[in-house]
Amino acid sequence: MSGAMQNALQAQAEAADPKSSAFVSANAGSGKTHVLINRVTRLLMAGVAPQNILCVTYTKAAAAEMLNRLFERLGRYSIMDNAALATALRELDATIPTGKNDLRRARALFALALETPGGLKIRTIHAFCETLLRRFPAEAGISPGFTVLDDRLGKDM
């Protein structure tokens, strides 16, 4: 494996570490979604409540892709046998314990994510900002009942 490839894999592993803060920015196809899915999975395995996790992307397509891949992974975890699940967890993070209770928790993540009030927060930057404005309109100096202009309406103004 080349030095550049090893550096890229090391950077991905560091970005997926939930103990550190990370801003992931890279070219298309470089593995950003994979890194963020790993990070969210590790956070969930560490006991972080799904409603306390926020992922922000630039496009609706990226947000949908991330959500689909995360649910796909958690769905696979829910039906894996013990040996396969333990291997998958060790590949995700060698420090994740793989005792019976840990495997049970990993299998329950899919249902937990599905049952999270309001769903998992994987949003575009625009949707995230709109949420903030709706929560704090007075602080932003805007009307509480504001509406967002779409591109078509914005051109007419």
Image: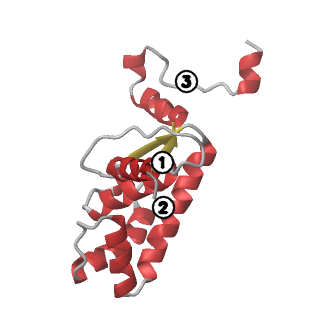
Local SS, label 1: strand
- In the picture provided, is 149 more to the left or to the right than 80? right
Q: Which residue is mark 1?
A: 122
Crowd rating for badge 1 (residues with CA inside 10 Å; few <14, some 14–19, many 20+): many
Q: Which residue is mark 3?
A: 146
The residue positioned 23% from the left and 66% from the top of the image is 95
Q: Are marks 1 and 2 in contact (CB under 8 Å)?
A: yes
Crowd rating for badge 3 (residues with CA inside 10 Å; few <14, some 14–19, many 20+): few
One can see residue 119 in this view: no
Going from N to C along the chain, the mark reached first, 3 or 2, is: 2
**Residue type highlighted by circle 3:** Phe
**Residue type highlighted by circle 2:** Leu
Local SS, label 3: loop
**Residue type highlighted by circle 1:** Ile
Q: Which residue is mark 2?
A: 70
Local SS, label 2: helix
Image spot of residue 60 (x, y percent): 61, 43
- In the picture provided, is 19 more to the left or to the right than 41? left
Image spot of residue 61 (x, y percent): 63, 47
Quarter of the figure with residue 94: bottom left
In the rendering, which numbered label is found on residue 68? none
Q: Are marks 3 and 1 in contact (CB under 8 Å)?
A: no
Image spot of residue 152 (x, y percent): 76, 25
Front residue of this view, candidates 8 and 14: 8
> Does residue 75 lie above or below 18 as drawn?
below
Residue depth check, mark 1 versus mark 2: number of the one nearer the observer: 2
Q: Are marks 3 and 2 in contact (CB under 8 Å)?
A: no
Residue depth check, mark 3 versus mark 2: number of the one nearer the observer: 2
Quarter of the figure with residue 149: top right
